[in-house]
Amino acid sequence: MLTIGVYTSGGDAPGMNATVRAVVRMAHSHNANVIGIRSGYTGMIENDFVPLDLRSVANVIQRGGTFLKTGRCPEFLQPENRKIAFDNLVKAGINALVCIGGDGSFRGAHALNQEYKIPVIGVPGTIDNDIYGTDFTIGFDTAVNTALEAIDRIRDTATSHNRIFIVEVMGRDSGYLALDVGIAGGAQEIFIPEEINDINNCIQRLKDSIKNGKQYSIFVAAEGQKPGRAYDLCDAIKKKTGLDAKVCILGHIQRGGSPTARDRVIASALGAGAVDALLRGESDKMAGIRDGKLVLVPLADAISKRPPVRKDKILLARILSS
Ligand code: ADP
């Protein structure tokens, strides 16, 4: 009898609940059981389990965050704690896992699989869209749309005052969110952690566009290693141009909110796909979407490779906003 342990781990993302719902409903349609593990790996170590029947996931498809809770669990990096976690899983009758999270969470799932041979399937849930092997991660579309709504409002005040705005979006190590938000928000410049966008060149382009009659401008910057990077850009612009520039850091509002239709559809397909993969005897893989089709990618690849950086989007934003 298949009993799947499902958990959400790492940073929360809109659509995680829709994924858990899909796992539960798909599993029950195949007479498999599902047990929820609360707070990611912490719940595994602390025995925090909850049986999930069909009705337990009613009315969650539209909810942001994760009702199973999530968390970071540094203890899980130690093999002795993974042994405790595995023993708890066995005691609870769990004989397969669906891990919903980012690459860090997948590292934990991969380690468990390697050490104890428990079948695991990962589902990419992160607003960053920075997982190799899938075109989309669950939560990305919602976060892009949330940031976009904010930019549209900022644009109103930017045009009214002829101002430059630097909008900082999330993305410590990855600029995928900034790239799509920048293109969709009509940003003049995009700054991402993977690529240096020389500020002096940006300022020259800004001056040129002002000469051409542009009266306001929006820059989108991924936060980089620490939030507040936008303030450095703002200071540089003020110093080198004397122009008034304002900063808006979007921060955690990008994580919350009801998932978009696209995120719900992806969450439903990937959650169900993960269960289907386990039923077919697949393991140590991530369920992803590529070219509109469900694919299984080795977890080893998902955690060791990076999707290509789309530098072309920086250029595209620049050309289209000139
Ligand atoms: P995300 O899944 O969003 O990338 P994190 O990088 O914080 O988030 O990872 C989530 C959790 O996964 C960590 O708190 C830890 O419990 C577990 N984890 C991360 N890396 C490893 C690893 N190398 N070995 C075992 N567990 C890991």
Image: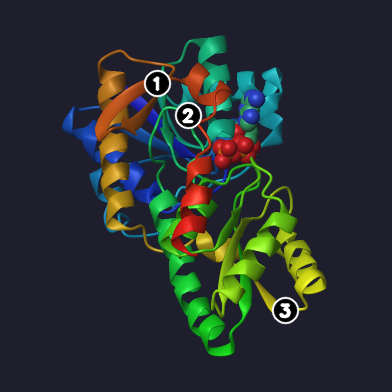
Earlier sequence position, callout 1 versus callout 2: 2
Question: Where on the picture, by quarter, is residue 58?
Answer: bottom left
Instruction: Respond yes or no on whether mark 1 lies under 8 Å from ligand 1.
Output: no
The answer to whether mark 1 and mark 3 are in CB contact below 8 A is no
Residue position marked by numbered label 2 in the rendering = 132
Residue 260 versus residue 149 in the image, above or below: above
| Residue type, mark 3 in image | Leu
Residue wearing tag 3: 243
Q: Residue furthest bottom?
A: 160
As displayed, is residue 111 above or below residue 258? above
Q: Residues within 10 Å of mark 3 (few under 14, many from 20)?
A: some
Identified by mark 2, the residue type is Tyr
Which residue shows up at 69% across the image and 49% down it?
Answer: 224
**Which quadrant of the figure has residue 235?**
bottom right
The vertical placement of 168 against 311, above or below, is below
Picture residue at 50% right of the left edge, 40% below the top: 310
| Residue at point 38%, 50% (across, down) | 15
* 218 on left or right of 90: right
SS state under label 3: loop
Residue 173 got which mark?
none
Residue 59 percent across, percent down from the top left = 28, 59
Residue at 59% across / 64% down in the picture?
219
Residue at the disc numbered 1: 297
Could you give the CA–CA distance between mark 3 and mark 2, rounded to whole angstroms?
Answer: 40 Å
Can I make out residue 165 in this image? yes
Q: Secondary structure at mark 1?
A: strand
Q: Which callout, 1 or 2, points to the residue nearer the camera?
A: 2
**Which corner quadrant of the figure contains ligand 1?**
top right
Res 65 visible: no
Identity, as a three-letter code, of the amino acid under mark 1:
Val
